[in-house]
Image (tube, rainbow, N blue to C red):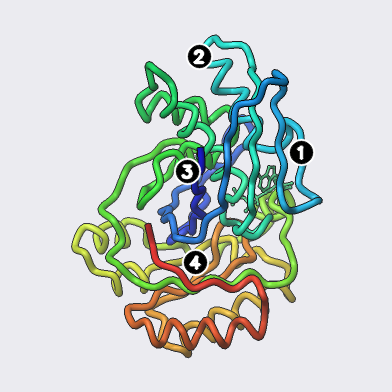
């Protein structure tokens, strides 16, 4: 079975209160994009669950979220683990704020569920995904959605109007736990207008959504990394993006375009900054 695992972007990302369990409550609008990993699932006779990826530094055991998803699925269905080979061709940059691992996990859940004689509905499948990671329930759902709580409370939203997306992952990576730790010592200067962005989605107003995009983690980045992300956003807007923001805990910057030629120009410009630059559509 061949399946695609789409990357996600955060059109908005807000962090609310820290909870007694140590997690932070989030409020964010998620959007899936055409950039996708490719997975192949094949039953094997060995009885072993095996994972192979084209990136040597990714785990090839149950620490790989794709394998963890398969184990969680079988456990939820009361089944014993069985022989399965999962082969992943990574396209989504790693540690980039685009939920690459979570998306691989969600793709495995969907594939196993689809092949099941008595498939779970998407809410039950998302609950299985929650055991794998906070972003997995959204990746099971896909499209445009409001995510709250740790990210598991999902409300589907009207789809973002068709547009081009230019995505650029700079050469450095950001530590997600370090950035969350920073949150508690920083006073956030601005917050995204998530409610306004939802209203713009309901009105089919692409520019209205793009104008309201913002991610509170941009304020928390170390100084040099923040300057780099701002530089990328400025290039995107300079090339005609309707809006630009950072995804997740970064450092990926992206812009939305209603004009394919402008998007192409931004793509070419940003390729000079990073080979991990992509031009795609929303899905
Ligand atoms: P998020 O946006 O959900 O915070 P991210 O884009 O920052 O995710 P990922 O690329 O999903 O981060 O990977 C983060 C970590 O997960 C890495 O340390 C990586 O080793 C591990 N990992 C496990 N399985 C996978 C996978 N299938 N693909 C990518 N990373 C994986």
Task: Measure the C-alpha gap from mark 1 to mark 2.
Answer: 24 Å
Mark 2 vs mark 3: in front? 2
Q: Are marks 2 and 3 in contact (CB under 8 Å)?
A: no
Q: Position of residue 261 (x, y in %)?
A: 39, 87
Q: Residue furthest right?
A: 57
Residue 150: tell me if it is visible.
no
**Which residue bears the numbered disc 4?**
190
Q: Are marks 4 and 2 in contact (CB under 8 Å)?
A: no
- In the image, taking residue 39 as reference, residue 126 lies left or right, namely left
Task: Measure the C-alpha gap from mark 1 to mark 4.
Answer: 40 Å
Task: Measure the C-alpha gap from mark 4 to mark 2.
Answer: 44 Å
Whether residue 165 is situated above or below residue 102 in the rendered picture: below
Task: Measure the C-alpha gap from mark 3 to mark 4.
Answer: 27 Å
**Which residue bears the numbered disc 3?**
139
Q: Position of residue 119 (x, y in %)?
A: 38, 21
Q: Are marks 3 and 4 in contact (CB under 8 Å)?
A: no
In which quadrant of the rendered view does residue 256 lie? Answer: bottom left
> If you read the primary sequence from the N terminus, does the residue marked by circle 4 or circle 2 appear first?
2
Disc 1 residue lies near ligand 1 with CB under 8 A: no
Residue at 70% from the left image edge and 37% from the top image edge:
51
For the residue pair 88 and 140, the one nearer the viewer reads as: 88
Mark 3 vs mark 1: in front? 1
Residue at 65% from the left image edge and 86% from the top image edge:
272
**Which residue bears the numbered disc 1?**
60
Residue at 56% from the left image edge and 11% from the top image edge:
79
Q: Residue furthest left?
A: 203
Mark 3 vs mark 4: in front? 3
Residue at 67% from the left image edge and 20% from the top image edge:
45
Task: Measure the C-alpha gap from mark 3 to mark 1.
Answer: 21 Å
> If you read the primary sequence from the N terminus, does the residue marked by circle 3 or circle 1 appear first?
1
**Which residue bears the numbered disc 2?**
77
| Number of numbered discs | 4
């Amino acid at each position: 079975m061949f399946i695609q695992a789409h990357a996600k972007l955060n059109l908005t990302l807000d962090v609310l209160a820290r909870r007694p369990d140590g997690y932070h409550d989030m409020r964010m609008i998620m959007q899936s994009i055409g950039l996708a990993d490719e997975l192949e699932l094949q039953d094997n006779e060995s009885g072993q669950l095996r994972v192979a990826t084209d990136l040597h530094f990714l785990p090839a055991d149950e620490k790989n979220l794709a394998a963890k998803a398969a184990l969680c699925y079988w456990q939820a269905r009361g089944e014993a683990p069985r022989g399965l080979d999962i082969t992943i061709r990574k396209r989504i940059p790693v540690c980039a704020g685009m939920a690459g691992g979570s998306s691989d996990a969600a793709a495995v859940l969907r594939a196993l569920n689809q092949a099941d004689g008595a498939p779970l509905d998407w809410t039950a499948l998302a609950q299985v995904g929650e055991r794998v990671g906070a972003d997995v329930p959204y990746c099971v759902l896909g499209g445009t959605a409001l995510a709250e709580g740790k990210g598991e409370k999902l409300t589907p939203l009207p789809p973002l109007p068709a547009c081009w997306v230019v995505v650029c992952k700079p050469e450095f990576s950001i530590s997600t736990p370090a950035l969350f730790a920073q949150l508690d010592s920083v006073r956030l200067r601005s917050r995204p207008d998530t409610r306004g962005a939802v209203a713009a989605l309901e009105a089919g107003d692409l520019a209205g959504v793009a104008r309201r995009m913002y991610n509170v983690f941009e304020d928390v980045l170390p100084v040099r990394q923040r300057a780099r992300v701002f530089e990328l956003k400025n290039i995107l807007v300079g090339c005609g993006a309707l809006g630009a923001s950072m995804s997740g805990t970064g450092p990926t910057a992206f812009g939305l375009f209603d004009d394919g030629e402008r998007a192409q120009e931004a793509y070419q410009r940003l390729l000079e900054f990073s080979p991990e630059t992509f031009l795609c559509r929303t899905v």
